[in-house]
Image (cartoon, rainbow, N blue to C red):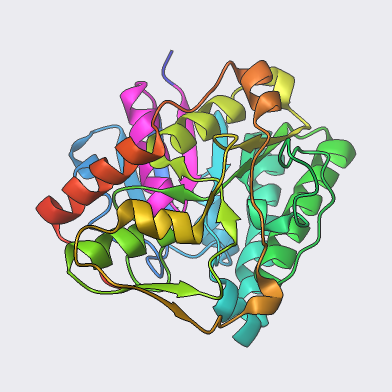
Amino acid sequence: MTKEIVVTGAAGFIGRWVTNELLARGHRVYGLDDFSNGSYRNIKELNESERFTIAEGDICDEDAVDELFNEGVDACIHLAAEIDVQESLEDPQSHFDSNVVGTQNVLEACRRTDTRLGLVGTCMVYDMAGSEEGISEEHPVKPASPYAGSKLAAENLAESYYHGYDLPVVILRPFNTYGPFQKTGMAGGVVSIFTNRDNQGEPLKIFGDGTQSRDLLYATDCARFIVEGTFCDEAVGEVLNAGTGSDISINELAELISTDGTEITHVEHHHPQSEVQTLRCDPSKAEAMLDWEPEVSLEEGVDRLRTWLREEGAEQA
């Protein structure tokens, strides 16, 4: 059955893959993006579908958000956000505006139309991992930057609408996601940055000592998780993590990605106080509730990304 879904941040990296997943399932997508992070390039091939439309607008603009919602909309997947840790430390107001005020606008539109909401959060809200099993949804939170704080505040707002208004809300926390269409400059993810630099024959620069580790999730696996989590009735009112269940240090990642002749260097960390040392997901709740598990290994994902970057060219940012 075809559903109508609003996707905020539809032209962003993850938004693009979520939209692609929804279209592949036969749904109708109404996208919203202000193109500060997203790009028309990301959605060029998606625009060929008659079931996809994109509106240019800011989630901080109530009217722009409201125009997307009507009684026929089945769900909203909310991805639009400011996402840069360093920028949040330099300009916390912009992250508060987008991530808190913007989310409030989306929640009000969902409440007005009784629309199911899949709110996409971040693993950066968690405190450092304290067990070998990885970070579960019960793990303590400790936002160490205005980015993480504003994303956690958005989750708390959404939870209040679930409890206060019985709005069907699912909070989704994917771990570090990578893949084609991700930016390759400082606003991108470490896998995309390293792979692009290796393709260009440039040194791979590691911030700090490189012992910090990440659980790296391929874009298509992340998109499946977000779509399936949003529509899972059992998940309403719940927080769900998604990751591979294993982590890799940044030093090991650099070794995996680098090819012969590529230099690996260490540089001073630009925000050590906001670094989460160990991010390893415990995905067992999502696996049990959604029957979801990642399908793409890190090695395969890096190969796919490397091929895409060579064929399509990297988007510098």
In the image, residue 284 sits, relative to residue 138, either above or below, namely above
The quadrant in which residue 162 appears is top right
Looking at the picture, tell me which residue is in the foreground, 139 or 224: 139
The C terminus sits in image quarter: bottom left
Left or right of 80 on screen, residue 24: left
Give the residues drawn in magenta, as a range: 3-27
How far from the left and from the top, in percent, is residue 36?
40, 70
Q: Residue furthest right?
A: 164
Q: What's the residue at 28%, 59% (across, down)?
A: 258
How far from the left and from the top, in percent, is residue 242?
59, 36
Q: What's the residue at 76%, 64% (across, down)?
A: 143
How far from the left and from the top, in percent, is residue 266?
45, 77
Residue 11 seen from this side: no
In the image, residue 287 sits, relative to residue 197, either above or below, namely above
Left or right of 214 on screen, residue 161: right
Q: Residue furthest left?
A: 311
In the image, residue 260 sits, relative to residue 236, either above or below, namely below
Residue 21 is inside the magenta segment: yes
Residue 145 is inside the magenta segment: no
How far from the left and from the top, in percent, is residue 219?
40, 41
Looking at the picture, tell me which residue is in the foreground, 245 or 26: 245
The quadrant in which residue 205 appears is bottom left
Left or right of 47 on screen, residue 269: right
Residue 147 seen from this side: yes
